[in-house]
Image (cartoon, rainbow, N blue to C red):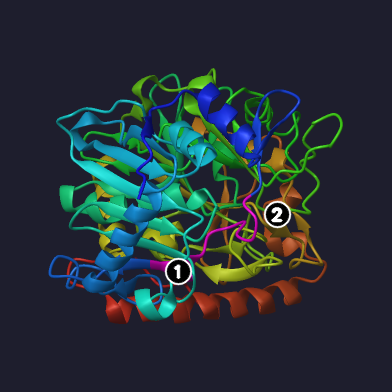
Amino acid sequence: MTIRPKILNASAATLIEHTLALQTGTLSADGALVVNTGTYTGRSPQDKYIVRDTLTDQTVWWGEVNQAMLPAHYALLRDRIYVHLALRQEYTLQASVNADPTYAYNVALHSESPWHTLFAANLFRSDWRADQPSITILHAPSFDAEPLRDGTRSNVAIVLDVASLTILICGTAYAGEIKKAVFTLLNYLMPMRDVMPMHAGVNVGSAGDGAVFFGLSGTGKTTLSTDPQRPMVGDDEHGWSTTGVFNFEGGCYAKTVQLSAAGEPEIYAATKHFGTVLENVVIDADTRIPDFNDTRLSENGRAAYSLDILANIAPQSRAGHPKNILMLTADAFGVLPPMSRLTVPQAMYHFLSGYTAKVAGTERGVKEPSATFSTCFGAPFMVLHPGRYAALLAERLEAHGATVWLVNTGWSGGPYGVGSRMPLEYTRAMVRAAITGALQDVDYTVDPVFGLAMPQSCPGVPASTLDPRTAWADAASWHGAACRLAALFHTNYVRYAEEAPAGAALGAPLAR
């Protein structure tokens, strides 16, 4: 058996050269690396496992989201992946996560793929320190798990071993598995250290007025947190400690479907940068110019780039306690208001519910938007019971007095297929009004189904769009659809309430 030498901390140029030599990627007209992940163009949540041992047995929220793997199965799979990597050219990256050094972890990625290594170099942080605990990732996309032998559902396996801080990824080339596996592990580790992990973007104003944007993929988290007037702390994963917020990552993983220079100039500019990875994005064979409207490969095309290439970034990727919390949802039924102000109990309720619509392509098999509840706006990554995270949020809100808003970036005037998507310029105007205080003194109306306080006016937004009842052709039809959605909220709430551990925060039911 011939063991090939590792390539340690290769430069972006070297990783790109190796990718081109392997014919696993090509260059765009502007020098971005364009790659195709093949069969898997989104996450495989049913193939994620956590090793169930004495550490995790009584702490992990076991179920459909967090599936257990026996320690013996994990050890055998890990050892075979080690051998697989040893027989191939291995690219090793030393990186880190968590911008606050008090909570930092090293990340050691061992991959057979140079472009995945570049992806990780873009997404993680570069400040490796020998005195930090280290997370190890064994990444082998060409290695297939064997269900009968490994206790897996398919050839794909994403396995987290909390005790050793080790992650196994095999059978899939979708790079998002690397990023989200680390986030999932941090969702276990951070609450144990009194830090609330957040699937959220964060930006900050000149006066230190931070804003947190919770939301699932496709709800506008990256788009809305990327604001030329407000430095970005990060677009996706953060921690909220007793001293403020900090970014887990060092890069962005932005959706590119229908991306344009006019609508999202910062993200669009990042796609033209040397070293950016364009994943499942179609490019013209002759001009090499990306076509972000072409979804033949996937609705889930992505751009992975380092925060360093953006001009407007918060120093040290940290900020103080936020003053505004925005919970983003893409309501496929078109019944929620585009903007509403929440009480703390309502905030807990909607945080626990995490209602949105799955966007086509985000997960395998999802071909069109469908209504779903994803607790804490990130159910696939929540390792503990959701009430644990909600309790941390309630504690922070009560201590620091942030205002919470529910923002519907989805449909208005009717459900998907009948109504229309809320224009981005209106959503931007409402968000800007909320975080600048322009909505504090306007009049509010409370809707009769959800009990949400809706502003009656907002700069730059037609008043007719602010109340969903007036946006529908028939108010009675809105009321019926709203009641049906409220019933789904209630069923979801009851399930979490029945399973809640001591100390969980569940919020207040809807005013039905």
Task: Judge left or right: residue 477 versus residue 428.
Answer: right
Residue 188 in the image: above or below residue 100: below
Callout 1 touching callout 2 (CB < 8 Å):
no
Which residue is identified by label 1?
A: 47
Q: Tell me, yes or no, whether the highlighted magenta stretch contains residue 38.
A: yes
Q: Position of residue 133 (x, y in %)?
A: 18, 40
Residue 185 in the image: above or below residue 226: below
Is residue 402 something that shows in the picture? no
Is residue 332 something that shows in the picture? yes
Where residue 239 is drawn, which disc sits there?
none
Within-10-Å neighbours for mark 1: few <14, some 14–19, many 20+? some
Task: Say which residue appears at 44% left-offset and 19% top-offset.
Answer: 206
Label 1 is placed on what type of residue?
Asp
Element at label 1: helix
Residue 51 in the image: above or below residue 201: below
Residue 416 in the image: above or below residue 488: above
Label 2 is placed on what type of residue?
Glu
Count of picture labels = 2
Q: Position of residue 154 (x, y in %)?
A: 49, 73
Task: Say which residue appears at 61% left-offset and 65% top-offset.
Answer: 364
Which residue is identified by label 2?
A: 299
Element at label 2: loop
* Mark 1 or 2, nearer chain start: 1
Q: Position of residue 499 (x, y in %)?
A: 28, 79
> In the image, which residues are magenta?
37-48
* Residue farthest toward the front in the current orientation of the protein: 1
* Residue farthest toward the right in the current orientation of the protein: 286
Q: CA distance from mark 1 to mark 2?
A: 21 Å
- Residue placed most toward the observer, 485 or 288: 288
Q: Main secondary structure of the magenta part?
A: loop
